[in-house]
Amino acid sequence: MAQPLKEMINAESVSVLADGLAAAWAPFPRRRFTERALAGLGGLELKDRVRHVAAALHEALPLPYPQVAGIVRESASRAALDMWSGWPATDHTAAQGLDHLESAMGTLAVLTPYSTGEFAVRPYLERYREDALKIMYGWAESPDEHLRRLASEGSRPRLPWGSRVRWLMTPGPTLSLLDRLRDDPSEYVRRSVANHVNDLAKDHPEVALELLSRWRSDGGSHVEAVLRHAVRGLLRSGHPEALRLVGATPGSGSVEVLALESDTVAVGGKLSFAVTVTAGAPGPVLLKYAIRRAGSRRVFHMGRREAAAAGAAFTVRKSHSFRPVTTRDEPPGARELEVIVNGRAAASATFTLVAP
């Protein structure tokens, strides 16, 4: 079983951060910081662990923030910081630097190649709006891919785990930034751009589709890959214009056979099924499936096939896991499997999820 993410904030990660801080500032109370950071850490969840270590860092550096920022920036090059050892430092910056925009944003710029500052930049976007965003537009011109990625990721309208910045959820503020980064040479950056547009599409699908259509017209080495990743949410919901954008005919295609391996599946097991589909028109056939139960419908990707002509047929086999996860409850009971072809529910079958 994979190690829970919260356990990555541990004695080792605290020690790495302490090494960097002690190397950057000789009076740093390394032992006191470490003891304070580790006290009670084991009983906390991930983000609470980050905040706990950041609070210990604040106590260990009772200095004016600009001086603290300089020490934190210097520490980045003095130890092997990574996501887990550096995250408390970015969280400290988010909490303690709010009255010092330039110094704090400069600190995040130094830290982000080691531990991304995407969460820590959100309070600055909330308080300073255009001034913070102007700095991020500068980051988009950086030779460092981590900074260019931070410009896109930190300003996402619906950044996962990030605080909501309501004015970023209105279309417009970041479009020029995305134009700058849409064909970036780094896949790391381009993937963030696509995720940013996918966020935008959740609230403003027409704006997102217009933007992507313009990018296709403007061309670029990577536009098609960015486009496909950016419209995945709209394709999941069967949005007709998104389907047309990727060349699919909305609602076209039929299911000839939907066969379940079993109509009973135990919690922790897998539902295996096969689908035979006939294309209704040449071009892409996008297959998705939904699992329904009372009060819930979740859609998943099943596959994409290219039909040379109407009438082309193909069979796809798939397994869906009902392994319990902490983020989703799977109570036993009646379920329905729904197969979706180019945005249209084309077939369904029922089954029962039972206790193991």
Image: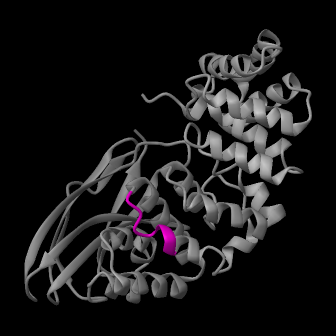
Q: Nearer the viewer, residue 158 or 341?
A: 158
Q: Which residues are magenta?
A: 179-185
Corner quadrant of residue 218 = bottom left
Which residue is at 49% across, 43% downward?
325
Q: x%, y% of residue 52?
A: 78, 30
Instruction: Note whether residue 155 is visible.
Output: no
Tell me which residue sits at (66%, 21%) in the image.
20
Q: Is residue 347 left or right of residue 168?
A: left
Q: Residue at x 34, y 73 (%)?
A: 223
Magenta stretch encompasses residue 184: yes
Between residue 335 and residue 53, name the one nearer to us. Answer: 53
x then y, percent, for residue 231? 42, 74
Please determine whether, in this image, residue 44 is positioned above or below residue 189: above
Give percent across and percent down for residue 316. Answer: 16, 64
Residue 356 position within the rendered picture, expressed as x and y whole percent measured from the top left: 40, 38
Magenta stretch contains residue 272: no
Asked if 251 appears above or below 93 in the picture, the reply is below
Q: Would residue 344 appear left or right of 117 to someone viewing this image?
A: left
Q: Which sits in the foreground, 73 or 157?
A: 73
Extreme residue toward the top, this view: 31
Residue found 63% across the figure and 81% down from its top: 171
Question: How many marks on residues?
Answer: 0
